[in-house]
Amino acid sequence: MADPIGIEIRNLYKIFGPQSAQLMQAVRNGMTKAELNERHHHVLGLNDINISMPAGRIQVIMGLSGSGKSTLIRHINRLIDPTAGEVIVGNQNVVTMSPEALRDFRRHKTAMVFQKFALLPNRTVLENTCYGLEVQGIPQGKRVAAAMHWLERVGLKGFEKKYPNQLSGGMQQRVGLARALANDAPILLMDEAFSALDPLIRVDMQTILLDLQKEIRKTIVFITHDLDEALRLGDSIAILRDGEIIQQGTSQDIVLRPADAYIESFVREVNRGRVIRADAAMEPASGPLPDVTVGGDCTLEDAGRLMVQSGTTRLAVRDMQTGRPAGTLSMERILAAITQRAPGHA
Amino acid sequence: MDWLTQFPQMDDNRLRDIKKIIDEAFRGFTRAYGDSIETLFEPLRIFMVQAERFMTGTPWIIVFALIIGVAWLGSRNPKVVAATAVTMLLIGYFGMWEDTMKTISMIFVCTVISIAVGIPLGIAMARWNRMQAIVNPVLDVMQTMPSFVYLIPVVMLLGIGKVPGLIAVVIYAMPPVIRLTNLGIRLVDKEMLEAADAFGSSDWQKLKNVQLPLALPTIMAGINQTIMMALAMVVIASMIGVQGLGQPVLRAISNQYFTLGVFNGFAIVGIAIIFDRVSQSFGKRLQKHSEVVHG
Ligand SMILES: Nc1ncnc2c1ncn2[C@@H]1O[C@H](COP(=O)(O)OP(=O)(O)O)[C@@H](O)[C@H]1O
Ligand SMILES: [Mg+2]
């Protein structure tokens, strides 16, 4: 398996339109998306994006439709050329690559999963899964072996000979996932990969992805417009609005400390008990520790259930790194965290 | 006030001079290069002669079996195959087998040439907008110019015979392949191309794996139209020496042989319907997997 590599995006700008280069300075000087559109009829796709995506983790990029998510993820494999800025993957700058180097980079370093699956209708499931390896020039025997392995891992064993239009949407996207994984690239780009699926199937696919990630440890960039999905999948989450990043952080940061009223309005709909972790709601230990202990990554809902089962109102919380007790969690703290509203924003 | 009632046209003498100069120049060109242009088309002539020799020289039963075989492979439809068999048997029984074979070999050669030239040209048009801007008006002219008009220079250059006839038919019949190849490639879903790019496909891999396969049903529709148009040209082409079902029709017109005309006319209609049904159901089978069954 390829070693995971991180992605560093610095001062990235994208202006759509014929005179993008000339308008760059105006945007740097603070012209807004609305002004640019009104005065110059250009679209400000991305405005000064800076993100550092750690290797081997899931980076979620969340935002409403039109916020620039697809534009941003397409800069990582340069399906879209930036107007200004840098995209550093490992130690290579994607922006300055020659066409040959870029093709090589796409073949070996990245793989992509698409919202509408983008499977070739004239090819079987197996032939679709082989596509990336075929493009690389891997011999037939090897690529079939790799494709079969990943088809089995996503639960499609026995469907190799079917055509995409004979499968349901969820199954088609599993093919899309298997095709990307067969590439054995350290970076996996997923643009609203699960957005076209029914809610239940969507949760299934999230589970498959999380299970796989424990083993494959790829750097996954996952785009979604759904906060629940973002909170469930993201090791780290960036929220995009009108081409700008308005908050970056872990799911705990987003839910407990939304940066502004806009994010707060999303967060309000979230099931906090399933998102907030014990170590985010605990208080420093004082006095004797309770008998029952939970891990710091335990959700408040699970902690509450444990309290009911063991007939207690206080739990000890274990630090996930050191394994030692780090604090205590009381019933009041759980209730406070679940019912809390961010001051000032509401 | 002459110019109000009479269109102010060019002086008659000057007009006559212009026509004369152009005619002279073209005649000079014909005299100087006619022979070398004829050698240029020699391979085409050999191809035609070979195709015709095969269709007329092979025992009829083998050719018949071959046609039935192609109809089956193309359509996989017993009804189409049965209709093909009946049509071919009737044609033979009414004494038109030889002429029909000549016409089929001509259509075959014409279709091969149209595909060999038309598909690369269509690909180039899809790829470069500039190319499309240049070729489209040329295709418009090819399709609307009365065929007699371009028969004149072709006959002047190459005389009467198979090759000039073939060229006339190809000029008339090729545009649909070119146009629909271009269209088919341009209609390929943008996300499919993005996927191909994202996996690092080269231009050639993208063309071979994504654009051509996805455009194939549209291209097949173009080939089907080309075959139909080539058949429609059979009678006109026979005026400049193309043999086959067109010549008896021509004879029937000049001598007022009603039955001869009708028989040969129906033979042309018969093979046109066979070609159409077979190539259409072939195109449909290519499309089988493109229809979305589930959401
Ligand atoms: N090729 C383009 N030309 C002009 N504007 C574009 C282009 N692509 C995207 N945009 C604009 O950029 C903004 C962000 O689009 P996109 O990245 O597709 O958003 P999202 O994926 O978050 O829905 C939108 O306002 C969209 O209209
Ligand atoms: Mg999008």
Image: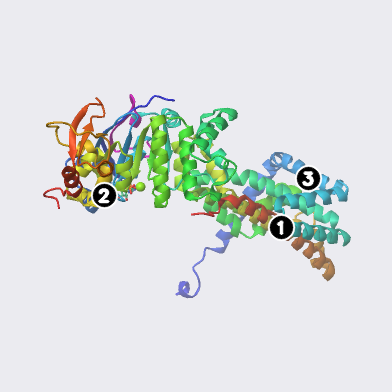
**Label 1 element class:** helix
Point out residue A300 in the picture as x, y percentages from the top left corner: 25, 42
**Left of A124 or right of it: where is A201?**
left
Callout 3 and callout 1 share a chain: yes
Q: Is label 3 in a helix, a strand or a loop?
A: helix
Residue B51 has which mark? Answer: 3
Residue where numbered disc 2 is placed: A270
Q: Which quadrant, please, contains the N terminus of chain A?
A: top left
- Circle 2 Cα neighbour tier, 10 Å, few/some/many (<14 / 14–19 / ≥20): some
Residue bearing mark 1: B231
Q: Position of residue B264 (x, y in %)?
A: 80, 63
Label 3 to label 2: alpha-carbon separation: 74 Å
User: Which residue shows up at 79% across the image and 67% down it?
Assistant: B253
- Is residue A38 shown left or right of residue A125? left
Q: Chain of mark 1?
A: B
Residue shown at 78%/64% (left/top)? B265
Which amino acid type is shown beneath numbered disc 1? Answer: Leu
Quadrant of the image occupied by residue B225: bottom right
Magenta-drawn segment: A78-95
